[in-house]
Image: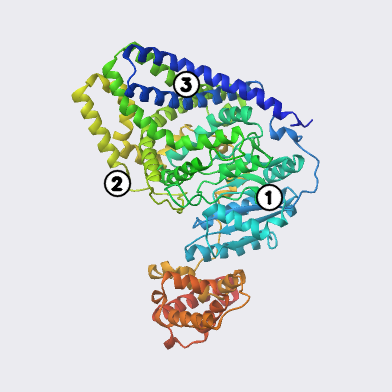
Amino acid sequence: MAATLDSVGKVARRRRWKFIGFNLLFVLLGILPMLSRFAKIGWTFATVVLFVLFVILLMQVVYGFTLAMTGWWVLRQKGDPLRINQTLPPHPNASELSPTAIVMPIFNEDVGRVFQGLRVMYESLQATGQAGAFDLFILSDSSDPNHWIAEEKAWFELCKQVQGFGHIFYRKRHLQQHNKSGNIADFCRRWGVKYRFMIVLDADSLMTGPTFVRLAQLMEQNPQVGIIQTNTKLVLGHSLFQRVNQFACYAYRPMFITGANYWQLGNANYYGHNAIIRIKPFMKHCAMPELPPTGPLGRRILSHDTVEAAFMQRAGYEVWSDYDLAGSYEESPPHLLASLQRDRRWCHGNLQHLWLLFARGLNFPSRINILIGIMAYANAPLWFLFLALSPLFYLVEQSSTANVVLFAYVMSLLIVPKFLAAWWLAASGEQLKTSASRPKIFMSVIAETIISTILAPILMLFYTQFVWASLFGAVVRWGHQKRKDDEGPTWQEFASVHWGHTFFAITVAAVIVWLAPAMLPCLILVLIGPIVSIPFSRLLASNTLGHRFARRGWFTIPEETHPPGELQQLRQPFDVPSYPSGFNQSYASDHGLLQAVLDPYVNAIHVSLLHEPTQVHIDAHVNMNDLSDRLLINGPHALTPAEKRTLLWDADGMVAAHQKLWCSPATYLHEWWQSAFRIYNESSAREILQTSPRLQ
């Protein structure tokens, strides 16, 4: 029997008071010893600052600990009866679903990975028998013409392979405003009224067909719900960095998200992808506001998801975390440098939420979710300042017993949840069968704890830099996210990123040894990470080391030992007809333009996807003729990147350039095009011979 959520408001209030009470209890257990120690020393400006920092940082540690302990307790009770997935029976009767759009914004992504993922998801959706209710949109903001043309070819090939014409659409946005949120907003303006729901994916997302259908059914069943966020699992990791992250996600996240659902209920957060959204209220209430243009955190918000969840709740709709729904996956960055590149943007976007923390009409859980996002990065400079001031405290009062007790208390708050998670995995027969032996589970948790302990101060220093840069006006742009790196960065690249922190940590260690050597054991856990950051970061990026741990059964997750069919299919390459292999490196920078002008097949696909203007000024035709003539007579190097994009955006200009190229004598064309023609014709002749045995 499906559960109902009618009384969720009263239950939520009771739960939140309990949750707040447990947080206060554990905070007090840490504060009281500190108060007694400060009373002995005496209150000065330095001690007051140190105490305030300690309280703020302890509250965050306690919050995580309470989440984990609450989640562990709920899991032991066989789950929370108040969860969104319980509002439907496991196998509901098949019914007609409302029109649902599946949207994937992309920006200069790996075309093969993106379209193989789309193919796998669409075929899985077809297998459910409900594919007719879903349309899939690839929303491209790619700035590189080579990616642009490759995406168009891949779209056409995908539609042919899965008979997806009329259900799979590709849109290249001409004016790329406001990054991902602007891309989604553009889709909503153009096509939002045609659909009731929208499922948002990232370029590395993967969801199974039954998961798509289940999300749509849940939204149909619960008209008061505006967003349902799935529990996205990290998969397909190769490097040690990826494998450690996906194991931590598999082992620890169930406790944390179960604990979060306990107090949030219908006021959960939204993470920007792998979630379903009710489009009408989203369009009406969730538009991103323009921040004041002055100040370093002004203008457009980069991190839009938490704000959209808060606005949806302000409009009276619920946001739920469907943490027990399977079939939702993503991939993690291949190494620390790629992760930091993403964190730089997230840090700036989350700090921009300071403008909205006290916005009118937001409820208490929304403000807490916004504050948690801000503190995810703002706590780094607070930790740095606390550690910088703590030697003053040590020099005044050196009670080793008190130091050990306080250190043990804080470390217990951090470590106990990890080993409760290990115990939970080891005690579960199903988890044991699909992951590894009990010793390997515990050894994986111990190894992950050691790695995260070394990594924590490294991240603290980087996040402190990020916060400082954001607060003092450094420009942050939405760049291409590196999702795969088979070879990894070089030693020189790692050294160029980490050397400053290594030098800083060695200098601090030397000063401590010189002035107060007894303090070194207390700070060694903080200093060791930055000191070894260059080789440590390089080891984490190693695919070889990651595969070696996999063979020995460490950091193993069920999706590796018993992968679902969709993940197995994702490993297969997506075959897109490529431009002939005979084109050498001199064509690489312009091979997208080359194909769109030279190849009739590619030219036809490209032109068909362009939006024809309703009225074109005569000067525009003259300009396009001039661009195409310069392109053919002088070669692509005669045009600037902006001029190439201008020509690619003009349907008439692309048709004219294609016709001129094929109809002009060779002497009219630049040698770049003459050579390209020869290679193309030779390749076409070989292809005809290979596909027509009677001609061989």
Q: Give how far across and how far down residue 368 sits, in percent.
A: 55, 33
Amino acid type of the residue tagged 3 in the rendering: Leu
- For label 2, the residue is 496
Tell me how far mark 1 sits from mark 2, CA to CA.
45 Å
- For label 1, the residue is 279
Tell me how far mark 1 sits from mark 3, CA to CA.
41 Å
Eye-nearest disc, 1 or 2:
1
In the displayed structure, would residue 54 be above or below residue 193? Answer: above
Name the quadrant of the C terminus: bottom right
Look at 40% across and 43% down and name the residue there: 471
Look at 45% across and 53% down and name the residue there: 479
Nearer the observer, 32 or 480: 32
Which secondary structure lies at badge 1? helix
Tell me how far mark 2 sits from mark 3, CA to CA.
35 Å
The tag on residue 287 is: none
Amino acid type of the residue tagged 2 in the rendering: Ser
Which secondary structure lies at badge 2? helix
The tag on residue 413 is: 3
Name the quadrant of the N terminus: top right
Q: Give how far across and how far down residue 675 sits, in percent.
A: 42, 78
Look at 62% across and 43% down and name the residue there: 311
Nearer the observer, 348 or 640: 348
Which secondary structure lies at badge 3? helix
Q: Earlier in the sequence, mark 2 or mark 3?
A: 3
Look at 29% across and 46% down and name the residue there: 496
Amino acid type of the residue tagged 1 in the rendering: Ile
